[in-house]
Image (cartoon, helix red, strand yellow):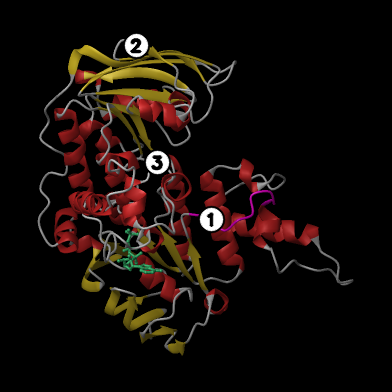
Amino acid sequence: MSPLLSLRHISKAFPGVKALSDVSLDLHQGEVMALLGENGAGKSTLMKILCGIHRPDDGEILIDGKIHHFHGYQDALKAGVGIIFQEFSLIPWLDAADNIFLGRELKNALGLRDRRRMLRETEALLARLKVSIPLDCPIAELSVADQQFIEIAKALSLNARILVLDEPTATLTPSEADHLFDIMRELRSQGVGMVFISHHMEEIFTICDRVTVMRDGEKVDELRVAETNADDLIEKMVGRRVENIFPIRRCDADFNDVVLDVVALKLTANSPEHSIKLHRGEILGLAGLVGSGRSEFAMGLIGATRPASADVTLEGKHVKLSHPAIALEHGIGLLPESRKTQGLVLPFSCRDNISLNNLDQYRNGAHLLRRRSELANAERLMQSVRVKAPDAETPVGNLSGGNQQKVVIARWLGHQCKVLIFDEPTRGIDVGAKSEIYALMKELTTQGVSIIMISSELPEVLGLCDRAAVFYQGSIAAVLEGDELDSQSIMHHATGGLSA
Ligand SMILES: Nc1ncnc2c1ncn2[C@@H]1O[C@H](COP(=O)(O)OP(=O)(O)OP(=O)(O)O)[C@@H](O)[C@H]1O
């Protein structure tokens, strides 16, 4: 019997980049195939070709043994291919049924929109996934996980038999991710074939049957998950063994030297007060579940949103951080969570994005920019986090997701800040690059920089932070250090004491 899907000898080049060279893979009914590779390895490009978003330069797509030529996304949908991106394609102000049937509303015998039938069908689709989601509210009011489940229901309503999930767990809490895996198991039992892209090794071992490893646009191996292990996969993926992803544990913090003292910061008049001290050379983790209020706290702290009240002291002096530019003048920088909407100007080059808020450093006596030194610095920083791009003049929008994130990190590494706030710095970043970013953060602390790191990844908080403030529903539930800083204690406080 022919496989559900065969990608045969697919190649694709973009200007200056060979994104895919002769990649083939098979996917069978009721199978979950992991697609693993470093940032820029070509995973998304391959999936965009499968979904008709890009045309291959060479190669064929076969579904049930039949060759298909996709001229656009709609062709792939018709052939039974659905893709769930990290950024959803749902309309926020419409409810689930209106989103699922957008552009193909069900009609009654009179040709009028049949809202009741659309609701019934939506209920049936969600029942197929074994999820219950309120149907009478705009989807913007639902959790990210529920929105993702609606995306999946939408794909199924279009009879998707091949489903691509591109880093679907990046913005989910651990229990939401477990729920997604249950849904994937259910779909697997119904014969749906799935391609799953993730940088989280443990997820591959939880949910996938086989794994295809890619490196530099080529397929390097294909293995049964039961017959491999994380270390081997990482080695195949990065081409070298990555023994310890975290730097050697050593505390660079001077706990007698408080750099930043935040007292009673209230985001709104009725919200809880946050007080936090940050010491010189310290990495303070802000742990907690997605949506626990950590980013809001950070945005309030640097003045990106105006807190109702705050008493902030920086190196012993009271400061009023009423705007991010003022925070920056004081040497406090924030690397935001959402690179595409908050962190980058996508049409600008890597060089522009890196020097964007640091241009004065490159002005000469006549206030003109010294382009050559700007470029040299951008190239050096890009190299330090191993950005994969043809050159520093490449528009950042052309880079893979993980490489875009690295450009944001490169910008802040080049800044002379006293305090750096990293919000989910390694989301979408491959394992090899993660360890390099951790090492760079640690190096900054040895130079006396103090770091606040918001992270939903427990190993990252445990492996890197000197202390961790755990957020629960908008409040700091505990500040953990020393022996108290372990995964059980973090989860205990992050779930309001519900987790054992
Ligand atoms: N539209 C485009 N224009 C130019 N180059 C592109 C474009 N899309 C992707 N590329 C390049 O193709 C290569 C493969 O990118 P792709 O997005 O497929 O990587 P990826 O494996 O999905 O990475 P990540 O893990 O970071 O998401 C990268 O070098 C990227 O810069």
Distance, label 3 to label 2, CA atoms, is 40 Å
Q: Amino acid at mark 2?
A: Lys
Helix, strand or loop for disc 3: helix
Region rendered in magenta: 87-95
Dominant secondary structure (helix, strand or loop) of the stretch shown in magenta: loop
Residue at numbered disc 2? 317
The quadrant the C terminus occupies is top left
- Residue 369 located within the stretch drawn in magenta: no
| Pair 3/1: label in front | 1
Question: Residue 88 — which label?
Answer: 1
Q: Nearer the viewer, residue 1 or 88?
A: 88
- Which of the two discs, 1 and 2, labels the residue nearer the N terminus? 1
How crowded pointer 3 is (Cα within 10 Å; few <14, some 14-19, many 20+) is rated as some
Q: Give the left or right position of residue 330, taking residue 341 as reference.
A: left
Q: Are marks 1 and 2 in contact (CB under 8 Å)?
A: no
Describe residue 398's horizontal placement relative to residue 390 as left or right. right
* Residue at 29% over, 35% down: 458
Label 1 – label 2 distance at C-alpha:
44 Å
Quadrant location, the N terminus:
bottom left
Q: The disc labelled 3 sits on which kind of residue?
A: Pro
Q: Quadrant of residue 151?
A: bottom right
Q: Earlier in the sequence, mark 3 or mark 1?
A: 1
Q: Does the magenta-highlighted stretch encompass residue 91?
A: yes
User: Label 2: how many residues lie within 10 Å, few (<14), some (14-19) or many (20+)?
Assistant: few
**Which quadrant of the frame does ligand 1 lie within?**
bottom left
**Quadrant of residue 165 within the rendered picture:** bottom left
